[in-house]
Amino acid sequence: MIPDYDYMANKFKATLVTWEDIDRWCGKISRDVADTFKVDTIIGIARGGVVPARILSDRLWVKDMLSVKTEHWGLTATKDGEAVLKTKIDTDLRGRKVLVVDDITDTGESMSVAYNYIKSLHPDELKSATMLHINRSKYVPDYYAELITEKNWAWFIFPWNVYEDLNNLIRKSISDYADIDKVRESLKQDYDLDTSNLDIETILEDLVHFGKMKRQNNRYVTVQ
Ligand code: ADP
C-alpha cells in the first residue's frame, strides 16, 4: 500500500513488472532458499503472493502449497490502514518447515499478520520470502530478491494485476473521454509509466467488455 503517497491522489510513480522480472526474482529466491532451508510447505499470501508461491513451489520441488488471505481495512480512511487476516487454513503445521510468500513487503503489514498467524499453528520452522522488499518496511523477510530504497518507491504493476491497476490509474488520471494516445500520454505524465510494451487497445476494450470503462467512437472513459 501507499502510506507516504496517496494512492487516491493523482501523481506517483508506477512501473510495469514483466514476466522476465518475476522469473529472475523467483529464480534468485529459490536458489537462496534451496541453499539454506529445506521447505515442506509453501503458503502464498492472497492475492499478490499466490503466483510467486506457485512458481516457488515449482522451483523448489515442493508440492504442498496453501494460501491465506490478508486485506487492508480503513485503506482510504487512514494512511497506513491495518492488515487483517481474511482466510485461515485448516491444516496442522506441526513438524513442517514452512515458507510464507508474498509479492512485496512495502509497509510489511500483510506479511507480519500472515507470519504471526502461521506461527500460531506451530510449524517446526517458519521463514518468509518476497520478491521485492522496500527498506522502510517494518517487517524484513528472510529472503527477498531485490531491495528497493524508499527513494525508488513505485507502485509495481505485476502481470497479474494489470487490469485492476490500469483501471485505477486511468480513473485518477483522466476524467473525460480520451483516445489511446491521450491515455498513454497521461499515464506517462502522471505516473512516469511507459506503456509502449502494452497492448493498451485490447486492455481498454476488455475493460469496456467488463463494464469498467465506456467507449464513444475511439475514446474511452472509466466508469466511476
Ligand atoms: P506490505 O505488507 O507488503 O506492505 P501491504 O500490506 O502494504 O503490503 O499491501 C498488501 C499488498 O498490496 C501487497 O502484497 C501487494 O500485493 C500490494 N502492494 C503493496 N505495496 C505495493 C507496491 N508498492 N506496488 C505494488 N503492489 C503493492
Image: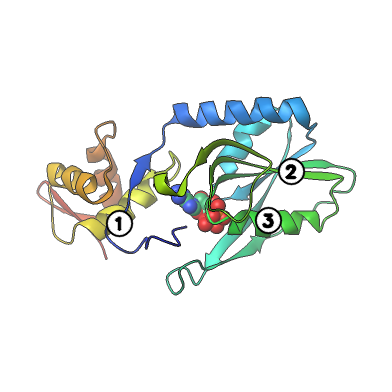
Marks 1 and 2 in Cβ contact (< 8 Å): no
Which residue is most to the left?
217
* Direction right: furthest residue: 95
Residue tagged 2: 127
Q: Comparing marks 3 and 2, which lies closer to the viewer?
A: 2
Image-based side of 127 in relation to 47, left or right: right
Q: Which mark is residue 212?
A: 1
- Tell me the kind of residue under disc 2: Lys
Secondary structure state at the residue bearing disc 2:
strand
On screen, residue 224 above or below 101: below
Image coordinates of residue 186 in percent, x first then y, are 18, 49
Residue in the image at 47% along x and 68% along y: 75
Q: Give the quadrant of the C terminus.
A: bottom left
Residue hosting label 3: 114
Cα distance in 3D space between marks 1 and 3 = 31 Å
CA gap between label 3 and label 2 equals 11 Å
Q: Report, in whole angstroms, how far the alpha carbon at label 1 lies from the one at label 2.
A: 39 Å
Specify the quadrant of the image occupied by residue 82: bottom right
Disc on the earlier residue, 1 or 3: 3
Instruction: Using the rendered view, name the quadrant where residue 141 is placed.
Output: top right
Residue density around tag 2, few if under 14, some if 14–19, many if 20 or more, within 10 Å: some
Q: Nearer the viewer, residue 224 or 102?
A: 102
- Can residue 89 be seen? no
Residue 19 vertical placement versus 14 (above, below): above
In this picture the colour scheme is rainbow
Classify mark 3: helix, strand or loop: helix
Q: Earlier in the sequence, mark 1 or mark 2?
A: 2
Q: Residue at x 41, y 47 (%)?
A: 151
What residue do we see at 13% from left, 41% from top?
Answer: 181
Residue 40 location, x and y as percent?
80, 36
Residue 138, placed above or below residue 76: above
The disc labelled 3 sits on which kind of residue? Ala
